[in-house]
Image (tube, coloured by chain):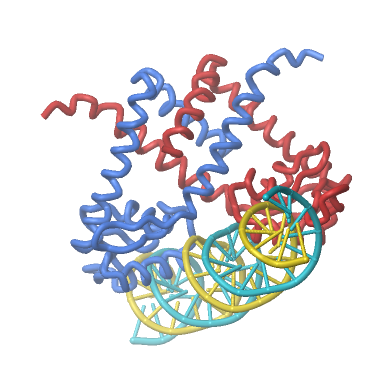
Chain colours: A blue, B red, C cyan, D yellow
Amino acid sequence: MDNNNKHEAPSLTHSFGRLILQLRKLERQPRTFEGIGPLTPSEMHTIDAIGPEGSVLMSELAARLGITKGAVTQLIARLESKTLVVRSMHPTDHRSTLISLTVQGKAAYTMHEELHQAFYNQLQTQMSPEEIAVFAKTIDKFIFALDH
Amino acid sequence: MDNNNKHEAPSLTHSFGRLILQLRKLERQPRTFEGIGPLTPSEMHTIDAIGPEGSVLMSELAARLGITKGAVTQLIARLESKTLVVRSMHPTDHRSTLISLTVQGKAAYTMHEELHQAFYNQLQTQMSPEEIAVFAKTIDKFIFALDH
DNA sequence: AACTGTAAGTTTAGTTACTATACTAACTCC
DNA sequence: GGAGTTAGTATAGTAACTAAACTTACAGTT
């Protein structure tokens, strides 16, 4: 039985299992933003996917988030009611709806970005730039492997 | 403005964002196992957390999964109805319930492990052992940073 | 100009995966 | 033998979806 790589595999298995559980936990924790109120992770991801500049089609949003159009409809309805997002008509195609961030939506976007930045800054105090580079590169291969 | 590390940070941000979306997608996809039927990710995580040997307390399970006891009650009820898990009384403490995998539950555990193994094998064809080692090490630091 | 097929978005009902709260039963300790 | 704690359950509510059926609108044909 030539399973001589038993020493490293369990470590990755274990680390990755813990990462999944940690992310599951993180992904169900709403976060409150100054002057905006609490936003769920899905709402935050949607704001991220729209971006601070320009506007995005509903269907494009569904593709970016990897969810169905129906789910996007519901998310956008909630974000619209919180005045973080506005719908506008497509100039030529009358079926399409363009989504863009309001001033408040952009504020939420920025605050979330700053939160990210703070996280990366903290990470940099514990990891060398080389390690971070390898990590980023590895994630891409990892995603590729997940996709098959 | 001394932001001279702008070259690498966006890459990690982008990769990590994609990873999150990919994992969100993965974590809502049920998977069908031979002779057992479809299992949701939460069910699978629970089976993993119980493990093939011995038995676990409900409260210990809640701690391992990072969810409330109430959530565990519901999950175990579903797994019990699928005969993947059995409850048994604690020998001395009459409040406690011990959970262990049935033969079918162990089969599901093993099949899932094999799936993991196949994934890691595929990963190894695209990454050097050194890269994998750095990746595992980095995940741990990453989890630590997430915890604060 | 009418006809067919496709694409964009919405609606609705159902499911999963939780949480929070209130509860019962059992244990511990002083 | 209470008082406080711990183990587990029950219940109602919410978030985050999916699937399926639907309405409009467009695009290409004939």
Quadrant of image for the N terminus of chain B: top left
Judge by depth and name the residue closer to the eye, A94 or D14. Answer: D14
Question: Is residue D28 placed above or below B99 in the rendered structure?
Answer: below
Q: Where is residue A41 in the image (x, y as percent from the top left)?
A: 42, 55
Q: Which residue is drawn at 83% across and 55% down?
A: B94
Q: Which residue is drawn at 86% across and 48% down?
A: B92
Question: Is residue C30 placed above or below B137 in the rendered structure?
Answer: below
Total residue callouts: 0
Q: Where is residue A135 in the image (x, y as percent from the top left)?
A: 43, 26
Q: Position of residue A1 (x, y in %)?
A: 82, 14
A36 to the left or right of A58: left
Judge by depth and name the residue closer to the eye, A115 or C30. Answer: C30
Residue B29 visible somewhere in the drawing:
yes
B38 to the left or right of A70: right
Q: Which residue is drawn at 62% across and 31% down?
A: A14
Quadrant of image for the C terminus of chain B: top left
Question: Is residue A146 placed above or below C12 in the rendered structure?
Answer: above
Residue A60 visible somewhere in the drawing:
no
Judge by depth and name the residue closer to the eye, B114 or B59. Answer: B59
Judge by depth and name the residue closer to the eye, A1 or B76. Answer: B76
Q: Position of residue A76 (x, y in %)?
A: 36, 67
Q: Residue at x 65, y 56 (%)?
A: B69
Please identify the quarter of the rendering in which residue A36 is found.
bottom left
Question: Is residue D3 placed above or below A133 in the rendered structure?
Answer: below
